[in-house]
Image: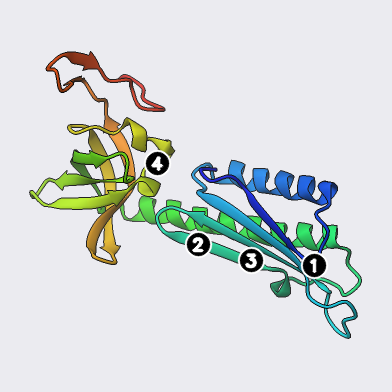
């Protein structure tokens, strides 16, 4: 997970056992989707003496590239008014797990069914401090990409001249690249002084 797990409590004491349970469940989600960006969990007491429904509310918010957000609320689950808080947490995370797996399967099927959507290009500019860069397409255009769209957490390994594979999609300000993956090992680059240095291979690179 690129951003540390965030847990907030409202009207509920910050119990260490409950924190440990949430951490365990979040770790499981992280193993299912190793490109998970963040997981935020909110736990609150809705009302002290409810007439209907469980008094506890648990909300899990997941973010993963390219721009997906998955939200699961305990109000959507089939809980019982008498369930304790740990049971509510487990139920919400079980629902989150099912939905996350479904989303990942859908993404993988899209790639399998529409391989023509994957295109190759060359990284031309990278702004490390701002977390984005640009890819030159085979037809000469330049596409914006964000660090969250780079697979295998390889953004920091990108340099001009690196070959990548990506999927073009519509962004808020026009076409942009998502699901960016390094496919061509960087060779040698020159620094500002003109001296050459070998670029460290990207994560997961295997020499063919």
Disc 2 element = strand
Disc 1 element = loop
Q: Which mark is residue 72?
A: 3
Q: Where residue 53 appears, x then y in whole percent?
A: 83, 79
Q: Which residue is mark 1?
A: 11
Q: Which residue is mark 2?
A: 69
Tell which circle, 4 or 2, labels the residue nearer the N-terminal end.
2
Residue nearest the viewer, comparing 1 with 44: 44
- How far apart are the alpha carbons under marks 4 and 2? 17 Å
Q: Where residue 152 appears, x then y in whole percent?
A: 43, 37
Q: Which mark is residue 28?
A: none
- How far apart are the alpha carbons under marks 2 and 1? 26 Å
Q: Which residue is mark 4?
A: 151
Tell which circle, 2 or 1, labels the residue nearer the N-terminal end.
1
Q: Are marks 2 and 1 in contact (CB under 8 Å)?
A: no
Pointer 4 local density, CA inside 10 Å: few below 14, some 14–19, many at least 20? some
- How far apart are the alpha carbons under marks 1 and 4? 39 Å
Q: Where residue 85 appears, x then y in whole percent?
A: 84, 62
Q: Are marks 2 and 3 in contact (CB under 8 Å)?
A: no
Pointer 2 local density, CA inside 10 Å: few below 14, some 14–19, many at least 20? few
């Amino acid at each position: 997970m690129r951003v540390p797990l965030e847990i907030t409590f409202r009207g509920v004491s910050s119990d260490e056992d409950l924190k440990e349970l949430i951490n365990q469940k979040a770790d499981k989600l992280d193993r299912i989707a190793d490109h998970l960006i963040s997981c935020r969990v909110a736990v609150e007491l809705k009302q002290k003496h409810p007439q209907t429904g469980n008094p506890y509310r648990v909300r899990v918010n997941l973010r993963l590239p390219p721009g997906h957000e998955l939200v699961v609320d305990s109000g959507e689950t089939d809980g019982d008014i008498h369930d304790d808080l740990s049971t509510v947490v487990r139920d919400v995370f079980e629902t989150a797990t099912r939905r996350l797996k479904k989303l990942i399967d859908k993404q993988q099927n899209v790639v399998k069914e529409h391989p023509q959507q994957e295109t190759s290009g060359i990284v031309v500019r990278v702004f490390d401090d701002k977390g984005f860069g640009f890819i030159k397409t085979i037809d000469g255009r330049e596409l914006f990409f964000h660090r969250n769209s780079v697979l295998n957490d390889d953004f920091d390994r990108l340099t001009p001249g690196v070959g990548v594979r990506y999927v073009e999609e519509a962004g808020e300000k026009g076409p942009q690249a998502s699901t960016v993956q390094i496919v061509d090992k960087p060779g040698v680059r020159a620094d500002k002084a003109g001296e050459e240095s070998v670029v460290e291979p990207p994560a997961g690179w295997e020499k063919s």
